[in-house]
Image: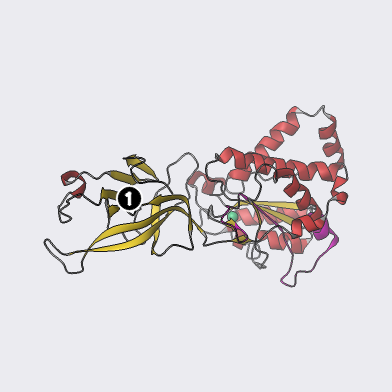
C-alpha cells in the first residue's frame, strides 16, 4: 500500500513465481480450482521509486478511500468493485521498534482482522478471517517465536482496509516490522509462508478447523519500549549557553537513545538522537556502557533531534573541548557513525 513499505511486494512476487513454476503439483491445482487470486503487488510505482509514503500528488493513498482524489485510490476502489473479492489482504510495513505486548521483543509481523465499522460488527467473513489468521500465525510462530503482534483495531474511516471490509471484502492486515540481526529476506519469507498458508487452508478447507482464539490471544502491539541504540551513563560534554573560551563546558551524565531512520534495506540509515536522560524504561536493540567516557557530537551538538554521530573519549584523557576541530586535535578513542563503530569497535563495552 505505502511506497516505503516494500517487504510484502517481494513476497507476493515470489508467491506468483512459485505458483507458476508448480502448476503441475496437486497443492497448486487445489488452489487454482478453489479460488481466483487478484494481486496488486505495488499500488504506487512512482512513490516506490522514490521510497516515500505518499504518491506523487503528496496524498496518502491509504487515507483516500472515500475522497478518491488520487488515481491509485480510484483504481483500487474500481478493482474492489469489479472483482468483489471474498477476502482481502492489505500489506504494509510498520515501525521497526514496535514491540509485542509487554515484552521488549520486536513485532516482526503483526496481524489484524479488520472490522468494517467503529462498532466492531462481526460477520461470517470476519470470523473466517480470524481462523485464517490463526492458520497464518501457527505457520510462522515456530520461526519467529514471541515476535508476532496484533495491530491496533481502532477504526480509520478513510483507510482502504477498513472500507474494503465495510464494502463486503473482509480484510486481513499484515504489517511487517523488523527483526534485529535478521536480514529483510527473513521477513519476506514470513510474509510468503503466512500468505501461502492462508491460501492452502482456504483451498483444502482446513481453514474451518483453526481456532479463532489463537488469533484473539495474540498480544497487542506496543510502542515506546525500544530504541536502536542506547548508550548508558555517558558523560556528555556540553558548551554552556553564551559561553566563550575555556572552562565553559558542562558535563551531564545521562543515557543517550538513538533511532534509525527508515531506508531501503540496501542503504545505510542515519540514526537520530531521540532522547537524552534516564532511559531505564527503554531497551536498546544494541546497548553500550558509556560510563567510562566523555562524549561529544561529531558534526552537531549532542542534542535530541540531531544526528547520532558521536565521539567517545576515555575519562582519563585531557581534552580541550573548545578546540575548533575536536576530532583532529584530540583523536577520540571511538567514533560511532551511521549506526556503527567507524573507529574503536569494542572500546565502549556492550552491555
Ligand atoms: Zn502502510
Residue at the location (69% across, 32% down)? 17
Verify whether residue 114 appears in magenta. yes
Residue 135 higher or lower than 101, as above or below: above
Q: Which residues are magenta?
A: 100-129
- Image position, residue 139 (x, y; %): 74, 44
Q: Nearer the viewer, residue 298 or 86?
A: 298
Label 1 neighbourhood size at 10 Å, few (<14), some (14-19), many (20+)?
Answer: many
Of helix, strand and loop, which mostly describes the magenta segment? loop
Q: Is residue 35 visible?
A: no
Q: Nearer the viewer, residue 279 or 95?
A: 279
Residue marked by disc 1: 309
Which of the 4 image quarters holds residue 189? top right
Residue at the location (63% across, 65% down)? 67
Ligand 1 in which quarter: bottom right
Residue 280 higher or lower than 105, as above or below: below
- Image position, residue 4 (x, y; %): 53, 49
- Image position, residue 143 (x, y; %): 67, 41
Q: Is residue 13 visible?
A: yes
Amino acid at each position: 500500500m505505502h511506497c516505503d513499505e516494500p517487504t510484502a511486494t517481494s513476497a507476493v512476487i515470489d508467491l506468483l513465481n512459485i505458483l507458476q513454476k508448480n502448476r503441475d503439483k496437486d497443492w497448486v491445482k487445489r488452489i487454482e480450482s478453489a479460488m481466483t487470486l487478484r494481486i496488486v503487488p505495488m499500488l504506487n510505482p512512482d512513490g516506490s521509486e522514490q521510497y516515500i509514503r505518499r504518491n506523487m500528488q503528496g496524498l496518502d493513498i491509504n487515507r483516500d478511500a472515500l475522497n478518491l482524489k488520487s488515481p491509485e485510490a480510484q483504481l483500487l476502489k474500481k478493482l474492489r468493485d469489479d472483482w468483489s473479492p471474498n477476502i482481502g489482504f492489505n500489506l504494509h510495513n510498520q515501525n521497526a521498534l514496535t514491540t509485542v505486548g509487554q515484552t521488549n521483543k520486536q513485532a516482526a509481523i503483526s496481524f489484524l482482522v479488520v472490522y468494517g465499522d467503529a462498532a466492531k460488527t462481526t460477520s461470517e467473513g470476519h470470523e473466517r478471517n480470524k481462523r485464517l489468521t490463526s492458520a497464518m500465525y501457527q505457520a510462522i510462530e515456530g520461526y519467529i517465536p514471541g515476535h508476532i503482534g496484533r495491530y491496533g483495531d481502532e477504526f480509520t474511516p478513510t483507510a482502504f482496509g477498513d472500507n474494503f471490509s465495510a464494502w463486503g471484502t473482509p480484510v486481513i492486515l499484515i504489517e511487517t516490522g523488523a527483526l534485529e540481526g535478521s536480514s529483510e529476506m527473513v521477513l519476506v519469507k514470513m510474509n510468503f509462508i503466512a500468505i501461502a498458508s492462508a491460501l492452502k487452508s482456504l483451498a483444502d478447507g482446513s481453514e474451518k478447523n483453526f481456532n479463532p482464539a489463537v488469533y484473539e490471544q495474540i498480544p497487542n502491539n506496543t510502542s515506546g519500549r525500544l530504541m536502536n541504540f542506547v548508550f548508558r551513563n555517558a558523560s556528555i560534554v556540553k558548551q554552556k549557553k553564551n559561553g566563550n573560551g575555556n572552562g565553559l563546558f558542562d558535563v551531564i551524565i545521562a543515557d543517550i537513545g538513538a533511532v534509525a531512520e527508515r531506508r531501503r534495506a540496501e542503504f545505510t540509515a542515519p540514526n537520530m538522537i531521540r532522547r537524552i536522560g534516564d532511559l531505564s524504561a527503554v531497551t536498546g536493540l544494541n546497548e553500550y556502557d558509556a560510563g567510562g567516557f566523555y562524549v561529544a557530537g561529531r558534526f552537531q551538538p549532542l542534542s535530541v533531534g540531531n544526528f547520532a554521530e558521536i565521539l567517545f573519549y576515555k575519562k582519563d584523557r585531557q581534552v580541550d573541548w573548545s578546540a575548533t576541530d575536536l576530532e583532529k586535535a584530540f583523536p577520540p578513542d571511538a567514533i560511532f557513525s551511521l549506526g556503527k563503530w567507524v573507529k574503536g569497535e569494542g572500546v565502549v563495552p556492550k552491555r
